[in-house]
Image (cartoon, rainbow, N blue to C red):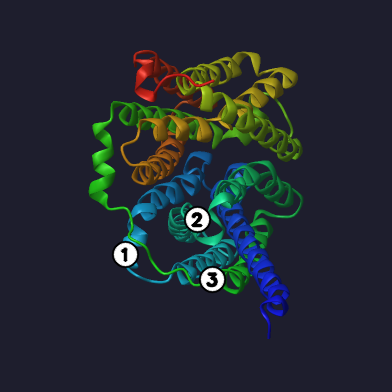
């Protein structure tokens, strides 16, 4: 066969491989979408789960705390624990475990069993996230890596915009167990897709715990980590209870909560794109404004939020601003980091741990003081985060660009 004759076949094979690689990227994105949806779905169904299993809303908030804390430790530790296991096997196995965890959650007879399934969900979230974050460069050509990375992590925004509201709507119109069971079915489909579409992915050298600790030599990283912890803890302390907040403070009926969460997610997606551009040029100013606006939304809610229209406006502000924190704080961290890969792993650890701590603390405050107390507490944490940024020289994150 001549070279001329072989070219069309070679080009077709290359095109087919590229399509398969992008389908693999899409499968990873949907995996992240389902995992983040699973992590946050109890937020929208908190009232139903609490009533069904005869626990207080504060205790039900542990359904957010547990997977957040477990995911925080799973992210750096699981890749080390599995050694040189092919990452295709690991991702597929984690999604299969997610399938099982969601199924067991759907049929759980008591709160203790349901909480145990959330431990499994946390392992899946942390392990999958840690591996998926570095997959883009192994699945597509170098010039396409930014696009692949954006697609993979669009699953996070998609979970807020579509996954959680859709799951909440399904739970409201059927039963929360149906929502959990649906996640199991979808996870099974993604498990099969990952196995079929991903190539062999031999293990690479994981980030070591010593390199994570070494990032604290940078003042910018120290401040960025502290601000991340304060903002995420404040947000999830209050947002975990957004359904009862909307019902009991604003007087909004339960049947409208899923629609408002959908709008909240849309506002967050818009905030993500706006902040991405702003943070790239002026990360210091962007990160300073974020906790200030979050403080305004939460501190004003107990009083201005008693009218449904004003409550919805504050909720949309809250969503748009919180939707911007991932890209903004990630930009801050990367501009300050000594090692970007280690800093990203550290950021994932702090973010997930803060979700768990925030939800747990919020539950205690709700049970002890009430919904107004948790909103004021969140506002105080946001104010503290803004003060920390204001006391930090802007040079720690480099000069403004553009």
Examine the rendered structure and indicate whether residue 228 appears above or below residue 114: above
Rounded to the nearest angstrom, the CA distance separating label 1 from label 3 is 22 Å
Secondary element type, mark 2: helix
Marker count (numbered)? 3
Quadrant in the rendering for residue 226? top left
Residue 222 coordinates in the image, percent (x, y): 31, 30
Of the residues under marks 1 and 3, which one precedes in the sequence?
Answer: 1
Examine the rendered structure and indicate whether residue 203 appears above or below residue 165: below
Q: Residue at x 40, y 39 (%)?
A: 357
Of the residues under marks 1 and 2, which one precedes in the sequence?
Answer: 1
Asked whether residue 96 appears in the rendered view, the answer is: yes
Q: Nearer the viewer, mark 1 or mark 3?
A: 3
Query: In front here: 270 or 229?
Result: 270
Residue 17 coordinates in the image, percent (x, y): 63, 69
Secondary element type, mark 3: loop
Q: Residue at x 40, y 40 (%)?
A: 347
Rounded to the nearest angstrom, the CA distance separating label 1 from label 2 is 23 Å
Q: Which mark is residue 199?
A: 3
Rounded to the nearest angstrom, the CA distance separating label 3 from label 2 is 13 Å
Q: What residue sits right under mark 1 in the picture? A: 81
Image position of 154 (left or right of 219): right
Q: What residue sits right under mark 2 in the picture? A: 137
Confirm or deny contact between disc 3 and disc 2 (CB under 8 A): no
Of the residues under marks 3 and 2, which one precedes in the sequence?
Answer: 2
Residue 346 coordinates in the image, percent (x, y): 35, 43
Image position of 368 (left or right of 315): left
Image quadrant in which the C terminus is located: top right
Q: Residues within 10 Å of mark 2 (few under 14, many from 20)?
A: some
Examine the rendered structure and indicate whether residue 186 appears above or below residue 341: below
Image quadrant in which the N terminus is located: bottom right
């Amino acid at each position: 066969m001549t070279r001329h004759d072989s070219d069309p076949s070679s080009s077709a094979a290359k095109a087919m491989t590229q399509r398969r690689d992008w389908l693999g990227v899409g499968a990873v994105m949907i995996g992240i979408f389902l995992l983040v949806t699973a992590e946050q779905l109890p937020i929208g169904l908190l009232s139903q789960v609490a009533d069904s299993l005869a626990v207080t809303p504060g205790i039900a908030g542990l359904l957010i705390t547990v997977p957040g804390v477990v995911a925080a430790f799973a992210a750096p530790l699981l890749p080390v624990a599995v050694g040189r296991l092919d990452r295709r096997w690991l991702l597929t196995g984690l999604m299969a475990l997610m399938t099982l965890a969601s199924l067991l959650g759907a049929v759980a007879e008591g709160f203790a069993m349901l909480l145990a399934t959330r431990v499994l969900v946390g392992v899946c979230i942390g392990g999958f996230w840690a591996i998926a974050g570095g997959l883009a460069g192994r699945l597509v050509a170098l010039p396409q890596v930014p696009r692949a990375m954006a697609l993979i992590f669009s699953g996070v925004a998609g979970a807020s915009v579509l996954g959680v509201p859709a799951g909440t709507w399904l739970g409201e119109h059927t039963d929360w167990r149906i929502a959990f069971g649906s996640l199991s079915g979808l996870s099974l489909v993604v498990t099969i897709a990952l196995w079929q579409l991903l190539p062999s992915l031999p293990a690479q050298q994981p980030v070591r715990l010593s390199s994570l600790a070494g990032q604290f030599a940078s003042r910018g990283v120290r401040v960025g980590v502290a601000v991340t912890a304060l903002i995420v803890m404040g947000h999830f302390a209050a947002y975990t209870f957004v359904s009862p907040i909307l019902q009991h403070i604003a007087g909004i009926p339960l049947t409208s909560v899923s629609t408002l969460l959908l709008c909240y997610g849309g506002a967050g997606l818009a905030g993500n794109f706006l902040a991405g551009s702003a943070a790239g040029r002026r990360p210091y100013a962007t990160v300073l404004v974020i906790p200030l606006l979050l403080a305004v939304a939460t501190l004003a809610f107990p009083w201005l939020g008693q009218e449904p229209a004003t409550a919805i406006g504050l909720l949309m502000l809250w969503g748009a601003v919180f939707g911007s924190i991932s890209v903004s704080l990630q930009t801050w961290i990367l501009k300050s980091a000594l090692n970007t890969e280690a800093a990203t792993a550290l950021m994932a650890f702090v973010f997930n741990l803060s979700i768990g701590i925030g939800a747990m603390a919020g539950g205690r405050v709700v049970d002890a003081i009430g919904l107004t107390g948790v909103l004021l507490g969140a506002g105080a944490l946001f104010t503290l985060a803004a003060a920390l940024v204001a006391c930090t020289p802007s040079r720690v994150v480099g000069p403004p660009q553009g």
